[in-house]
Image (cartoon, grey):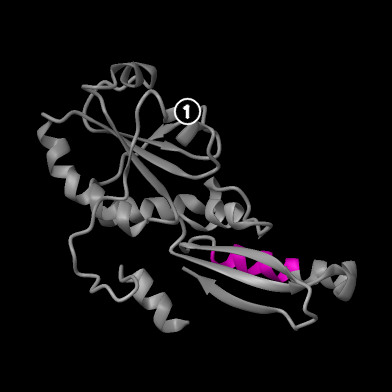
Amino acid sequence: VKILLKERLDGKVGGGSGEKSETSASIQLTSQNFDDVVLKSKDFWIVEFFAPWCGHCKKLAPEWKKASNSLKGKVKLGHVDCDAEKSLMSRFNVQGFPTILVFGLDKDSPYPYEGARTASAIESFALEQLETNVAPPEVTELTGPDVMETKCASAVICFVAFLPDILDSRAEGRNKYLNLLLSVAEKFKRSPYRQAFILNSLRQPPSWFPYE
């Protein structure tokens, strides 16, 4: 498991070298998807409003790409092309480029990021903000492949615990397992992991495995 974690966090996947050119994890946002993707999301978002011709935006681009890839699975980064999305530019009162807005728990009240425009500064800011700007961790029961895809697809690692059936562990035992999972989720809130559980009706002791 330790080897798997190291490879995934270093950007390596299933036999890959991890040294290939990465695409940016920053999500392109438009007037068609902004509300659904950002405002209705429980995730912590940092959004760059840029113009393709802007020199400062071009300078920020590689730093933004690096930050988005480093924060993948923890914080969502997105970008808006204001030349193409003037309605979003007006909606959020963007008056200069690049403007970086932070959408925390209160999505109706975004606030500007005013730190240095380097990957390391953006990453540090994002991780610090996670402590107060993300919803409490949750542990999801996986009732089917669609739930697993929804909950685990965006995570670098998704830990799945197989728990005894409630008829075997009783409510007290079930709550004990869930409280343990929640305590682990809280401890690693700033990490790119997700947790979930599946009921185990085979009368086996609880077990964990990382899901890629």
Q: Position of residue 15 (x, y in %)?
A: 30, 76
Quarter-of-image position of residue 58: top left
Using residue 204 as the reference point, say whether residue 133 is left or right of it: left
Using residue 54 as the reference point, say whether residue 35 is left or right of it: right
Q: Depth check: 122 or 71 in front?
A: 71
Quarter-of-image position of residue 33: top left
The residue range painted magenta reads 178-188
Q: Depth check: 133 or 52 in front?
A: 52
Residue at the image position 47 percent from the left and 82 percent from the top? 1
Question: Mark 1, residues whose alpha carbon is within 10 Å: few (<14), some, or many (≥20)?
Answer: few
Q: Amino acid at mark 1?
A: Asp
50 magenta-colored:
no
Q: Position of residue 180 (x, y in %)?
A: 71, 71
Q: Position of residue 163 (x, y in %)?
A: 74, 73
Disc 1 on helix, strand or loop? helix
Q: Position of residue 94 (x, y in %)?
A: 30, 22
182 magenta-colored:
yes
